[in-house]
């Protein structure tokens, strides 16, 4: 039985993918180091204003609709297909490239849906850990150029995806896996592959590892030089604890920033110089963090497309976004395009609903900064601040179980005496009072029919 087939059962019990994947879910690192490059800092601050992006997982794993790449590890949390040997499983999985034939490939649809959802930046998966390259690479034959999509005028899919998203005004970013399980210089075929790591001792075979370092450099070079302006280089995997996997990242970043000045590098696995922002995965930190960070969270419970998706409600996503922004971060929402090359109707419906809310209430999200009191005691109201230092926003997102209350209250963040509390969606003022340090606000009668209320007010 495959993982994606047993997920719906566990979703019904209120569990998430983290139950199965705790071993590879990233958490926020303990320390953060601001970049020294002024151009990177400038671009990073522009990125911090965007608040909401999309990450697209699309590859050979989309064909059967399964958890991306991980089926070809033999780690304990993976449920194997007992009808095949492990070696047969790997051959079957890698052979899916011949079935990858997205005949309805429509990156313009992706980009428009993303923009209409209120997203401001994109991160596209150029290569996951399985090694399948979604661009025209000279480093390997295992790419979209030699897939079932071979010969199609748009088979260099990365070019058309980046062009479509730039045309819609989204900041372009590329996901890239540092480990590559298809490369013989990472998983040496003469040895077993018991886990996600390289399967030989680097100190015993330094020349082999040097070839892998060159392989990663060459692929990064192609991505940075052949696909127009890129603002984000989002690096996944390549674990820095024992056994350490040194890919000479400093040389790669130097090359990349010569081609792409100010490039934001997101080194997820190795905190330090190249972790330009932090990336907790499938979770929201329990406190406010005032350095650059982003939670990457899926719209369903999988990163890629699956046959029977369970979507989060629009209200839930808005709640997640509001809490993340109030705590100082951005939301990177995971969406998996279908094997045919479309964002499916169910996802489009949710994204349109989110976008409709943001069109009226986005002032409380975009280009905001944090305020010390960022949520009320009940954690039903989240606060953001305008950069003018005089204006706060109180966001009351819909709760899937309890809806939206008729009345809200909070301590601190007292509105300025005599000022108005404005419902951003209607531009109408709301009834409120502050007694001592506690503010009470009566929400509009139709609030229960919405995905949330955002309130603008002046402070003392």
Image (cartoon, rainbow, N blue to C red):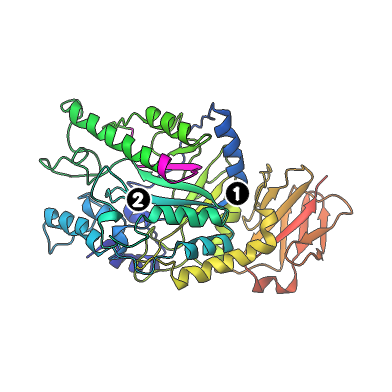
Image point 22% across, 61% down: which residue?
98
Q: Quadrant of residue 62?
A: bottom left
Mark 1, residue position: 50
Quarter of the image containing the C terminus? Answer: top right
Q: Mark 2 to mark 1: distance in Å?
A: 27 Å
Image point 73% across, 47% down: which residue?
386
Q: Quadrant of residue 405?
A: bottom right
Image point 74% across, 58% down: which residue?
455
Q: Is residue 283 visible?
A: no
Q: Is residue 279 visible?
A: yes
Chain part drawn in magenta: 224-240
Q: Magenta includes 57?
A: no
Residue 128 percent coordinates (x, y): 33, 49
Residue 57 percent coordinates (x, y): 39, 56
Residue 194 percent coordinates (x, y): 18, 45
Please tell me whether mark 2 sits on a helix, a strand or a loop: loop
Comparing marks 2 and 1, which lies closer to the viewer?
2
Classify residue 458 as left or right of residue 50.
right
Q: Pointers 2 and 1 in contact (CB under 8 A)?
A: no
Image point 64% across, 61% down: which residue?
358
Mark 2, residue position: 135
- Name the residue nearer the viewer: 155 or 72: 155
């Amino acid at each position: 039985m495959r993982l994606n087939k047993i997920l719906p059962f566990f979703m019904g019990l209120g569990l998430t993918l983290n139950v199965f994947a705790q071993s590879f879910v990233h958490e926020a690192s303990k320390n953060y180091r601001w970049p020294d490059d002024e151009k990177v800092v400038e671009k990073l601050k522009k990125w911090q204003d965007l608040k909401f992006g999309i990450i697209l997982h699309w590859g050979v794993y989309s064909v059967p609709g399964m958890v991306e790449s991980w089926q070809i590890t033999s780690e304990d949390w993976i449920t194997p297909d007992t009808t095949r040997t492990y070696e047969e499983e790997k051959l079957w999985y890698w052979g899916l490239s011949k079935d990858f034939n997205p005949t309805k490939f429509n990156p313009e649809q992706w980009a428009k849906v993303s923009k209409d959802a209120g997203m401001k930046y994109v991160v596209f998966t150029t290569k996951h850990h399985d090694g399948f390259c979604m661009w025209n690479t000279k480093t390997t034959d295992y790419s979209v150029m030699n897939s079932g999509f071979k010969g199609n005028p748009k088979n260099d899919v990365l070019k058309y995806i980046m062009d479509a998203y730039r045309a819609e005004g989204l900041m372009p970013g590329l996901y890239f896996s540092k480990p590559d399980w298809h490369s013989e210089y990472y998983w040496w075929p003469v040895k077993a592959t018991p886990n996600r790591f390289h399967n030989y001792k680097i100190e015993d075979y330094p020349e082999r590892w040097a070839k892998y370092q060159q392989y990663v450099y060459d692929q990064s070079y192609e991505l940075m030089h052949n696909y127009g302006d890129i603002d984000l280089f989002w690096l996944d995997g390549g674990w820095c604890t024992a056994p350490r996997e040194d890919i000479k990242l400093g040389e790669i970043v130097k090359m990349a920033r010569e081609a792409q000045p100010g490039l934001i590098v997101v080194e997820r696995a190795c905190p330090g110089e190249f972790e330009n922002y932090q990336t907790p995965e499938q979770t929201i930190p329990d406190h406010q963090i005032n350095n650059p960070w982003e939670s990457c969270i899926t719209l369903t419970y999988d990163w890629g497309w699956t046959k029977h998706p369970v979507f989060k409600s629009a209200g839930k996503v808005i709640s997640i976004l509001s809490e993340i922004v109030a705590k100082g971060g951005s939301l990177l929402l995971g969406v998996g395009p279908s094997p045919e090359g479309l964002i499916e109707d169910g996802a489009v419906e949710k994204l349109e609903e989110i976008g409709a809310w943001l069109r009226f209430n986005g002032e409380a999200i975009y280009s905001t900064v944090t305020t010390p009191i960022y949520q009320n005691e009940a954690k039903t109201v989240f606060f953001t601040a305008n950069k003018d230092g005089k204006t706060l926003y109180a966001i009351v997102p819909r709760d899937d179980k309890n809806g939206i209350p008729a009345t809200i209250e909070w301590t601190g963040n007292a509105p300025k005496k005599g000022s108005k509390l404005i419902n951003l969606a209607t531009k109408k003022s709301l009834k409120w009072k502050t007694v001592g340090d506690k503010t009470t606000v009566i929400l509009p009668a139709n609030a229960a029919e919405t995905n949330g209320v955002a309130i603008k007010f002046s402070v003392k």
